[in-house]
Image (cartoon, helix red, strand yellow):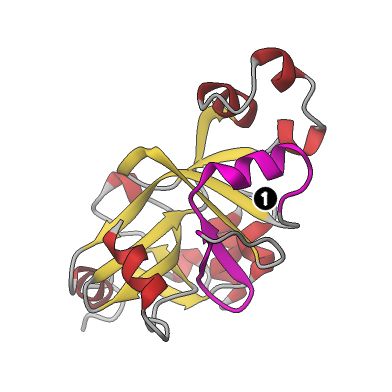
Amino acid sequence: MDLLRHKKMAAGRGFLDDQFLIAMPGMKDDRFTRSVIYICAHSDEGAMGLIINQTQQMLFPDLLVQLGIMNEQEAIRLPAHARDFVVRNGGPVDRSRGFVLHSGDYRVESSLNVSDDICLTATVDILRAISTGRGPRHALMALGYAGWGAGQLESEIAENGWLTCPATPELLFDADIEHKYDRILASIGIDLAHLSAAAGHA
C-alpha cells in the first residue's frame, strides 16, 4: 500500500497517527457503525487505519492453515494463546490482506513504527512468531483496512462523522472487544447518551 510505503520512507508523523477514530452516532456508513479505528498512517495523501472492535468469523488456526504456515494437525496442537488469538475485521478495503498491530518489543525489517510503542507488520513472519510464542507481548490481527483519499478523513471529521482521541496501548490491546467503543468514549469523559449525532452544529 502506497501510504504505508510513504510513511516508512518519510520522517515524522501525521497529526492523526496513533489516534483512535470513534464513529459518531449519526455515522451514515453501516460498515463503520459504533466502530473504533486505530490510525496507522496519515498524511496529505490520505489516511489508513484498522477497525479494532469488529471480529471475523475466521479463527487464527484456520488462517494459519489457509496461508500454508502449518497443517491442520499442527494447528490443533497450538498453545492456547495462539488458538484463541482473535482475527478482526480491519475494514472494507482489501479484506484478503492481513495486518498485525503490536507492541514494539518485536520488529522485523518490514515493521512500520506507528508510534514509539506501537508497530504495524504485514508479513507472515509475525504470524509464525505468534504461533510459536516468539511474537510480541501485545498484538492484534486484522484482515482488511479502512482507507481515505487526500483530505477525505479531515472532511468527515469536520462534518462530525468521527471523534478523535489519543490511543493508549491498554485500550488498543485489551481483550474486551465488545465494550471497547463505550470504554474509549468513557476514557475521554463522553457519555454516549449525551452524544448528539449533530454535535458541533448550531
Which residue ends up furthest to the front in the rendered image? 109
User: Total number of numbered labels?
Assistant: 1
Q: 35 left or right of 115?
A: left
Q: Residue furthest top?
A: 73
What span is in magenta?
Answer: 110-135
Q: Is residue 29 visible?
A: yes
How far from the left and from the top, in percent, is residue 20?
48, 69
Q: Quadrant of residue 21?
A: bottom left
User: Which residue is denoted by mark 1 in the rendering?
Assistant: 176
Magenta stretch: residue 24 in it? no
- Name which quarter of the figure residue 155 lies in: bottom left
The picture places residue 142, in percent across and down from the top left corner, at: 49, 45
Q: Is residue 111 magenta?
A: yes
Quarter of the figure with the C terminus: bottom left
Q: Nearer the viewer, residue 47 or 5?
A: 5
Look at the image and tell me whether residue 178 can be seen. no
Q: Is residue 152 left or right of residue 10?
A: left
Q: Residues within 10 Å of mark 1 (few under 14, many from 20)?
A: few
State the residue in front, 144 or 21. 144
Q: Given the image, on which type of amino acid does mark 1 rest?
A: Asp
Considering only vertical position in the picture, is 177 above or below 81?
below
- x then y, percent, for residue 145: 37, 50
- Residue sitting at 50 percent across and 71 percent down? 114
Viewed as shown, does residue 159 lie left or right of 18? left
Residue 130 sits above or below residue 179 on the image: above
Kindly identify the residue that appears in the image at 53 percent across and 68 percent down.
Answer: 185
